[in-house]
Image: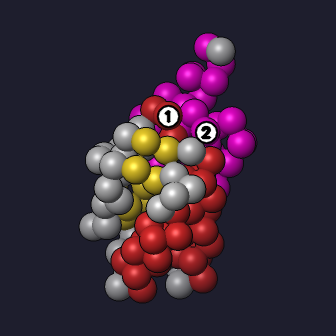
Amino acid sequence: MFQPSQSLTFSNASAVLAQGLQALAQQQSVIDMAALTTVDSSAVAVLLAWQRAARERQLALRFRNLPANLRSLIALYGVEALLPGDTADTGAAADSVRQR
């Protein structure tokens, strides 16, 4: 299972994108975000690119352990339905945005 390191921001988005695409090419269909602590909007773009690549390969891609800061960005951009994560993650993202 592919697991990005602690950061997914503009400064390393291209490299992390390439690593994830390589994992998808090896038919990995789960990406574990447990180590991720620092994100910006580039992270959402990378997840969307991975999802598009997975669909092209007819893989049902799932994201695990989405950190709260990334879930908030996903909800902010309104792309929760495009980026399926753990069931608990999806609800927590919606709750986080409602509380603001």
Does residue 43 appear to the left or right of 23 in the view shown? right
Amino acid type, residue under disc 1 in the picture: Asn
Does residue 7 appear to the left or right of 34 in the view shown? right
Quadrant assignment for the C terminus: top right
Q: Residues within 10 Å of mark 1 (few under 14, many from 20)?
A: some
Residue named by callout 2: 73
Answer whether labels 2 and 1 touch (C-beta < 8 Å): yes
- Residue 93, x across and y down, in percent: 55, 32
Q: Is residue 19 above or below residue 84?
A: below
- Residue 27 magenta: no
Quadrant assignment for the N terminus: bottom left
Question: Can see residue 10?
Answer: yes
Residue named by callout 1: 69
Camera-nearest residue between 81 and 21: 21
- Residue 7, x across and y down, in percent: 40, 50
- Residue 89, x across and y down, in percent: 45, 37
Q: Residues within 10 Å of mark 2 (few under 14, many from 20)?
A: many
Which residue occupies 49% across, 28% down? Answer: 92
- Residue 10, x across and y down, in percent: 56, 56
Amino acid type, residue under disc 2 in the picture: Leu
Snapshot colouring: secondary structure
Callout 2: SS: helix
Question: Can see residue 83?
Answer: no
Q: CA distance from mark 2 to mark 1?
A: 6 Å
Helix, strand or loop for the magenta stretch, by majority: helix
Bounds of the magenta segment: 71-99
